[in-house]
Image (tube, rainbow, N blue to C red):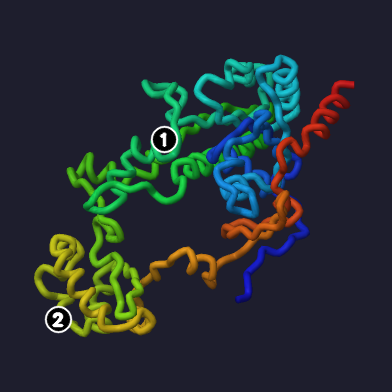
Amino acid sequence: MQHQSVKKLHLMHDLEGITVVSVEQAVAAPYASGRMAQAGARVIKVERPEGDFARRYDTLVNGDSAYFVWLNHGKESICLDLKQDSEKALLQKMIASADVFIQNLAPGAAARLGVGAESLNDAHPSLIICNISGFGETGAYAHQKAYDLLIQAESGLCAINGTTDGPARVGVSVCDIAAGMTAYQSILQALFARERDNERKGRIINVSLYHALADWMNVPYLQYRYGKKNPGRHGLKHPTIAPYGAYPCADSKFILISIQNEREWKNLCTVVLGKPELATTDGFADNTSRVSNRETVDSIVADEFAKHSRDDNIIRLEKAGIAYGRLSELDDLINHPQNKYLTINSEHGPVELLAPDGTEFDADTVNAVPSLDQHGNLIRAEISRMEN
């Protein structure tokens, strides 16, 4: 099939001239700095001598880790042994010439290394400092280590994800990604504010996995706190809308549909279900009633869909103007016609990534996944020249 590729653009990089130093590992901080690299910033990734442990999450991408390839292309890598005073001093010099400093070390580690936010802010007032942690800088859990699945559980996400048989993990590192997205937007906001400030003041940004995901949990939180409604776990059904979920078709393929208003419900009843009278029947005429009678509603929809193949059901749904989605397997994702791709280089050969929408990339910016300490000597020489 023909791929939609992201074309090389001959445009000024949006963040050209911005230097980011990131003492980072795993997912959240690399996500934030990775988005800055894609936008044209110079990102210097500081790794421990053995490297970011995400390099070894797996070896499935031509010998490289899927997470590492996705999050670290376009960066420079330098290894520093921050147990050594000379290496800590080198980090301080790197930060002194940077616009942004990001770190997601264990709680308290940055301060012990002499790169705590307050001391950096005093020394470099224009520096934007972003700390990424598990639970934040204050509070009873501030010094507790945290990883994605632990925060999925702590934040209540697992309470609304899964089925009636039990909770489940969201299949990607959603808490890490939420924190990385929050950090990225906060850094961009700080850069914009600094440009408008005559004194070019930086700021300290604190982002945590818990608070980033807690923001995403506001709907079930509000429903439960003020409406005393526990959304529960509904698998592939929507907790507050019906019909909205997955139904098997005659060819054993699944299709999801979503009814958002009574006009769509009437169209579904008339065009797809062949039961126009159902649209105004007591117990089915409005969404609240349908949610209360979800089992009956789902049974009626499922019985009709089971008579036809998925493609035939799609034809009728299109005619009725009903939103639908196919339940895709990973094979389907690989071949999805809406995919856009971004080809990058890695130590073991080219890799084709799924490209996000909303941003154009320059191929030169995103073209390389750094090998461990690939740029170490160059960066050390650069700092030495700056001192002379």
* Pick the front one: 50 or 96: 50
Q: Position of residue 151 (x, y in %)?
A: 39, 37
Residue at left 39%, top 49%? 170
Rendered position, 89 above or below 75: above
Q: State if disc 2 and disc 1 touch (CB < 8 Å).
A: no
**Which SS class for mark 2?**
helix
Q: Label 1 sits on what residue type?
A: His
Label 1 or label 2, whichever lies nearer to me, is 1
Q: Quadrant of the N terminus?
A: bottom right
- Of mark 1 and mark 2, the one earlier in the sequence is 1
Rendered position, 118 above or below 190: above
Residue at left 28%, top 42%? 221
Rendered position, 161 above or below 374: below
Rendered image: mark on residue 370: none
| Farthest residue, direction right | 388
Would you say 201 lies left or right of 28 here? Answer: right
Would you say 150 lies left or right of 352 here? Answer: left
Query: Could you classify mark 2 by the number of other residues whose Cα lies within 10 Å: few (under 14), some (14-19), or many (20 or more)?
Result: few
**Which SS class for mark 1?**
helix
Residue at left 27%, top 43%? 222
In space, the residues marked 1 and 2 are separated at their CA atoms by: 47 Å
Q: How many marks?
A: 2
Viewer can see residue 197: no
Q: Label 2 sits on what residue type?
A: Glu
Viewer can see residue 54: yes
Q: Position of residue 260 (x, y in %)?
A: 30, 66
Q: Quadrant of the C terminus?
A: top right
Rendered image: mark on residue 277: 2
* Pick the front one: 113 or 197: 113
Q: Which residue is mark 1?
A: 211
Q: Position of residue 110 (x, y in %)?
A: 58, 21
- Name the quadrant containing residue 358: bottom right
